[in-house]
Amino acid sequence: MHLFGQNVSFFSALFLLLALGLALGFEFVNGFHDTANAVATVIYTHTLKPVYAVVWSGLWNLIGVLTSSGLVAFSVVSLLPVELVLNVGSAAGFAMVFSLLISAIIWNLGTWYLGLPASSSHTLIGSIMGVGLANSLLSGHVFGEGVNWAKAQEVFGSLLLSPVMGFFGAGILLLLLKLLIRKPALYQPPEGEKPPPIWIRGLLMLTCTGVSFFHGSNDGQKGMGLIVLILVGILPAGFALNPAATPADIQSVVRHAQQVEPILLKHAPVTITGDEATDELSAYLKTKGVFSPKTFEALAGKNREVAIELDGRSSYDDLNIEQKKGFRSDIYLLSETIGKLIKQHKLSDPAEVKAVSAYQTTLQKQTKYIPIWVKFAVAIALGFGTMIGWKRIVITVGEKIGKEHLTYAQGASAELVAMATIGLADKYGLPVSTTHVLSSGIAGTMAANRSGLQMETLRNILLAWVLTLPVCVFLGAAIFSASVYLTFHLFGVR
């Protein structure tokens, strides 16, 4: 069977379908688990009937996915163990992808069934940490070495801060609306099935649209990076390097490599190359930021190898599969090491930082890309998920957080803050939880309005939030360990 320029066996093709099915299944569950939050306010204020609300939200999720940058997708991938990303086509690499997807789907389905708005972002990131911790034990490394703790700290910061912003931001916005807009109808709950006045309806439609769009552009990316890893592992001939790279893109890498060579040689007059350089850069990325002079030596040597390999080349098509896989690993190691050195301020000259940062951006374009058909597939899965399983979470958000019915102003305030928070996180490539931001925003408006809060529901939601990370760490680690054990001990595959 011939797929994307590579001959594959029937078993590999079947494996590919299974892996892609799991990744799209995660996005499908994400759709009815998380996106339901976006439609809760328009449904409970009778702005739109449920069937129109979920179709409208699904459409804007699709648009959000299609216009997304990919930054969030690769922020999630950066949390994965380096050696498994570099060897994603190995049995352990596939076990990693399957384990984190299965554990994330299990927890998402469980919390959805109970009607608890838990975070798909926490779910996936917890699963990734579990895989990383298990891999560090199974591969004989220091426990915890398999987790990118610097990136995890950055992601956790955004996940913890976003619900606080949702609660206080929505509450303050509601109070401001009361001061600035003196229209009593805005602060009343709906009367029976009667829709709100047209201007209020337009405002709520706008906020629902914004949350749906930004949910697609942020949450929709989380499965994209994993799908690309799956494609790289099974079909490296077609996906190890950006198939859309032009001759100008390839020569741009060479030009930047030549420009930064004097900078690197200034820090490392002696260079190391080949497997020794690969091992040194891998070790640097796996540790908690432990830097040694050999890091610059390996970086300079690897940079020269890349420049020589690409000089005069106009396409990646004349590289064989092993060359493409090796070259992808080299580019990944170069770009990730450069990023880490910049964050640790190992380069102090602003001109040097600017040149090296431009080089990193050029390198990333060769491996950090999302094929357009992957965006469409994720968008469709997310949209269908929204349309099918929305009701359980909507009921919790719309009826069970506050003691009084949601007013128009409360719904608009919560969604405006959610829209702004998610949009800001998307700009900086940070995965945040739509669920956390919007649920906490609804609670914030209820508190600001003195409408009362249903503490039992809030306790259940908080319990789900607190348990998500540890449970998913355990599930990810257990499923990964079992997968590695089975493939090695039963089938003899490493």
Image: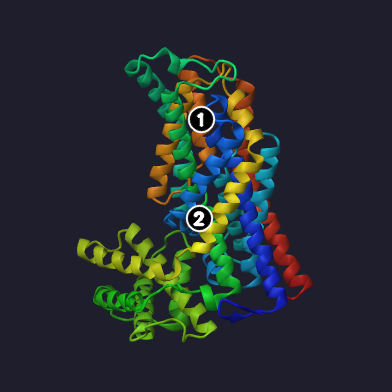
State which quadrant residue 290 falls in.
Answer: bottom left
Q: Residue 374 vs residue 429: left or right?
A: right
Quick one: 412 or 107, which is closer to the camera? 412
Quick one: 75 or 239, which is closer to the camera? 239
State which quadrant residue 24 falls in.
Answer: bottom right
The C terminus, quarter of image = bottom right
Whether residue 209 is situated above or below residue 430 in the rendered picture: above
Q: Residue 357 vs residue 103: left or right?
A: left
Please tell me which residue is depicted at 45% across the width and 44% down the height of the picture: 214
Residue 396 seen: yes
Q: Position of residue 137 (x, y in %)?
A: 63, 62
Please tell me which residue is depicted at 64% across the width and 47% down the height of the picture: 29
Asked if marks 1 and 2 touch (Cβ < 8 Å), the reply is: no
State which quadrant residue 55 falls in.
Answer: top right
Q: Position of residue 39 (x, y in %)?
A: 55, 34
Q: Secondary structure at mark 2?
A: helix
Binning the other alpha carbons within 10 Å of mark 1 as few (below 14), some (14 to 19) or many (20 upward) gives: many
What kind of residue is marked 1?
Answer: Ser
Q: Give the label on residue 266, or none.
A: none
What kind of residue is marked 2?
Answer: Val
Cα separation between marks 1 and 2? 24 Å
Whether residue 95 is situated above or below residue 194 in the rendered picture: below
Whether residue 212 is situated above or below residue 404 in the rendered picture: below
Q: Secondary structure at mark 1?
A: helix
Q: Give the label on residue 76, or none.
A: 2
Q: Position of residue 295 (x, y in %)?
A: 38, 71
Q: Residue 27 vs residue 164: left or right?
A: right
The tag earlier along the polypeptide, 1 or 2, is 2
Query: Dot 1 corresponds to which residue?
Result: 440
Q: Position of residue 134 (x, y in %)?
A: 63, 59
Please tell me which residue is depicted at 30% across the width and 63% down the height of the picture: 346
